[in-house]
Amino acid sequence: YNYCIQTSGGSTVTLKNMRIINASKNGLFTNGTNIYIYRSIFSNNGGNGAQGAGVLIQNGSEFEVYDSKFINNKSSQGGALYISPSGLDETHFKIKRTKFINNVTDRSSGQGGAVYIAYGNVEFENVLFDGNKSYTIGGAVYIYNYSINSPNVTFNHVTFANNSAGVSGD
């Protein structure tokens, strides 16, 4: 599957001081796993139609990131991070003191240059989005609005700089 790290099935995984670089698809793919990331770097991951080249989250995972960097990742949607847990789950994601730099969607239909959010409660605090690019909408972040269970997203002390989108949402 071309994942650097793959987790599934209700376990808890903590990554500290990791460098996940040059994965051909996703740096981390998690399916129903609680993930805690501290002081780590996800860089130059993606391609091959990947969603969330740095991290792809599915099916009810708890996810927290602190003091980390997502740099130069490339995917079809959510250049660095793709959050799509089951819409029925009350999942919570915290991303704090983290930088998203020069991430990109690599397809003409790509959304969310750095982050794509489909479901869940997501909190960004003291985060930098700089130089991310989407070929359609959401140069830095794209929040998908489903008719039910739409995501709840909070931005607190977040900087958006030099992001671009081909259609809207620079």
Image: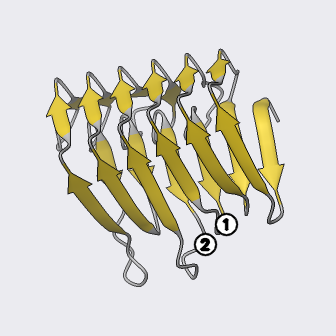
Q: Secondary structure at mark 1?
A: loop
User: How many residues crowd around disc 2 within 10 Å: few (fewer than 14), some, or many (20 or more)?
Assistant: some
| Relative image position of residue 98 (x, y in whole percent) | 38, 34
Q: Secondary structure at mark 2?
A: loop
Report x, y in % for residue 162. Answer: 16, 23
User: Residue 139 at what x, y percent from top left?
Assistant: 26, 36
How is this picture coloured? Answer: secondary structure
Marking on residue 139: none
Rendered view: 147 above or below 66: below
Q: CA distance from mark 1 to mark 2?
A: 5 Å
Placement of the C terminus among the 4 image quadrants: top left
**Is the N terminus in the top left, top right, bottom left or bottom right quadrant?**
top right
Identify the residue at horizontal 40%, vertical 26% (top origin). Answer: 104
Q: Position of residue 2 (x, y in %)?
A: 79, 29
Badge 1 vs badge 2, beta-carbon distance below 8 Å: yes
Q: Is residue 116 above or below residue 80?
A: below
Above or below — where is 76 with respect to 146? above
Of labels 1 and 2, earlier in sequence is 1
Q: Which mark is residue 59?
A: 1
Residue wearing tag 2: 86
